[in-house]
Image (spheres, rainbow, N blue to C red):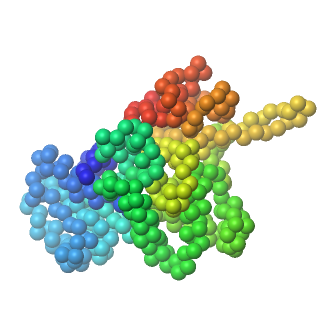
């Protein structure tokens, strides 16, 4: 199925001719190759670039095995350069190319070559990929389908049907070609076991991955909840009867982040304007993979909605923290107390900021007051939002807080008026 990825296509368009290697990174099976070899290739053709100026190489294709040797690859590219006009070099799975950093830098020095690559080894499935190119790389991070992209591929379904399907099976593009729930569940479970876990074992030389498997399950079960390595160590000790150390837990979490399976969100003291190192929250990059780890048995709409909002905000280019608001109060006896209230998401993009609470349902005045409490104690002028799945139209409250319907947030890219 053909699925448009307008956000990422525009990012590649914006980076055209910028003199850097465009490095497309992200979770395996999130659509990186399709973006480059189909969507961007077609864009170039439709905007006046002739086919013979687009030099493509899928280095995972065994028929191109010889091109994995650096000199052979350079000869391949240069033999297709017709003149001093712009040529576009699109390379899939570039990690198969020997000394690829030097080869790509050589191409850049040639001039008038616009270079784009994807990759799937440790270096390309890592947050540190840009350091490989010593200032000559420009990263485009690709996520699984966001809700609006998912909706474009399933136009015949109602919003409620789409929401349930998306919260259950997530947004990996290949799922759109599968028909039954059984096929989708088997695909996600197999993908986790045969691709992601295999990658982790091979990349980090993990011989006994039992504790890592358990950690992934715990992270899946508690996604969006505050935690830290010490708390996780205690869970292993009391529940799993394991003596795994905090250091090992932290290292495993770092591995999962580097593979783009999870992301962490740090705590931010809004009044004190400082970060708090621990605890923090972890969110899964894809809800379907999260659910697959739990055999689709732990379906909690409120938690899944929070993870979905986090992912949507990241797709839109926000950095996202967990907010903390500290209140100094006194009890009935006049004794001073300090209370800490949580803001689900502190969202920053450039100089713009907003605060968001995720409330699956607000059935009563008391519940609404609970969701508002932290927002109303933030003394600045940035937008404050409650996103709710209730069948409530988007509206502004008298105190200025925006109540935003989940359906509007997910389907309207301008739903946050920043």
Residue 407 is left or right of residue 1, and the answer is: right
Res 19 quadrant in image: bottom left
Report the residue at 79% width, 39% height from top: 338
Image spot of residue 277 (x, y percent): 65, 54
**Can residue 262 be seen by looking at this rendering?**
no
Up-down relation of residue 40 to residue 194 (above or below): above
Residue 14 is left or right of residue 231, and the answer is: left
Q: Most extreme residue toward the bottom, as rendered? A: 207
Report the residue at 48% width, 46% height from top: 308
Res 64 quadrant in image: bottom left
**Can residue 345 be seen by looking at this rendering?**
yes
Q: Most extreme residue toward the right, as rendered? A: 333
Up-down relation of residue 295 to residue 321 (above or below): below
From the viewer's side, name the closer residue of 380 and 405.
405
Residue 22 is left or right of residue 229, and the answer is: left
Image spot of residue 298 (x, y percent): 56, 54
Report the residue at 35% width, 46% height from top: 150
Image spot of residue 333 (x, y percent): 91, 32
Report the residue at 62% width, 67% height from top: 249
From the viewer's side, name the closer residue of 6 and 268.
6
Residue 143 is left or right of residue 118, and the answer is: right
From the viewer's side, name the closer residue of 334 and 162.
162
Total numbered badges shown on the rendered structure: 0
From the viewer's side, name the closer residue of 359 and 107.
359
Image spot of residue 364 (x, y percent): 64, 28
């Amino acid at each position: 199925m053909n699925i448009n990825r307008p956000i990422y296509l525009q990012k590649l368009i914006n980076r055209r001719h910028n003199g850097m290697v465009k490095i497309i990174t992200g979770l395996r099976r999130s659509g990186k190759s399709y973006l480059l070899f189909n969507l961007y290739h077609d864009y170039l053709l439709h905007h006046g670039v002739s086919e013979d100026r687009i030099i493509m190489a899928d280095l995972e294709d065994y028929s191109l095995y010889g091109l994995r040797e650096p000199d052979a690859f350079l000869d391949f590219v240069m033999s297709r350069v017709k003149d001093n006009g712009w040529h576009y070099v699109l390379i899939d799975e570039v990690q198969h190319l020997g000394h690829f950093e030097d080869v790509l830098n050589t191409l850049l020095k040639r001039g008038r070559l616009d270079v784009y690559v994807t990759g799937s080894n440790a270096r390309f499935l890592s947050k540190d990929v840009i350091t490989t190119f010593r200032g000559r790389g420009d990263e485009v991070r690709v996520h699984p389908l966001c809700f609006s992209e998912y909706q474009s591929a399933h136009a015949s379904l109602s919003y409620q049907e789409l929401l349930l399907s998306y919260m259950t099976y997530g947004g990996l593009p290949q799922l759109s070609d599968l028909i039954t729930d059984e096929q989708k569940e088997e695909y996600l479970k197999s993908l986790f076991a045969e691709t992601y876990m295999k990658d982790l074992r091979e990349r980090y030389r993990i011989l006994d991955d039992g504790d890592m498997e358990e950690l992934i399950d715990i992270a899946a079960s508690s996604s969006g909840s505050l935690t830290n390595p010490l708390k996780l160590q205690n869970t292993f000790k009391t529940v799993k009867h394991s003596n795994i150390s905090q250091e090992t837990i932290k290292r495993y979490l770092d591995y999962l982040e580097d593979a783009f399976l999870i992301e962490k969100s740090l705590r931010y003291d809004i009044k004190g304007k400082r970060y708090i190192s621990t605890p923090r929250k972890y969110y899964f990059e894809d809800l379907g993979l999260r659910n697959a780890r739990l055999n689709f048995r732990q379906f909690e709409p409120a938690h899944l909605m929070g993870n979905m909002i986090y992912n949507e905000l990241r797709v839109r280019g926000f950095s996202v923290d967990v907010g903390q608001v500290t209140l100094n109060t006194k009890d009935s006896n006049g004794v001073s107390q300090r209370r800490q209230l949580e803001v689900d998401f502190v969202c920053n993009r450039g100089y713009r900021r907003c605060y968001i609470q995720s409330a699956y349902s607000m059935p009563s005045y008391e519940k609404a007051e609970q969701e508002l409490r932290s927002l109303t104690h933030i003394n600045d002028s940035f937008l404050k939002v409650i996103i709710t799945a209730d069948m409530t139209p988007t509206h502004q409250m008298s105190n200025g807080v925006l109540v935003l319907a989940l359906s509007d947030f997910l389907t309207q890219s301008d739903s946050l008026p920043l």
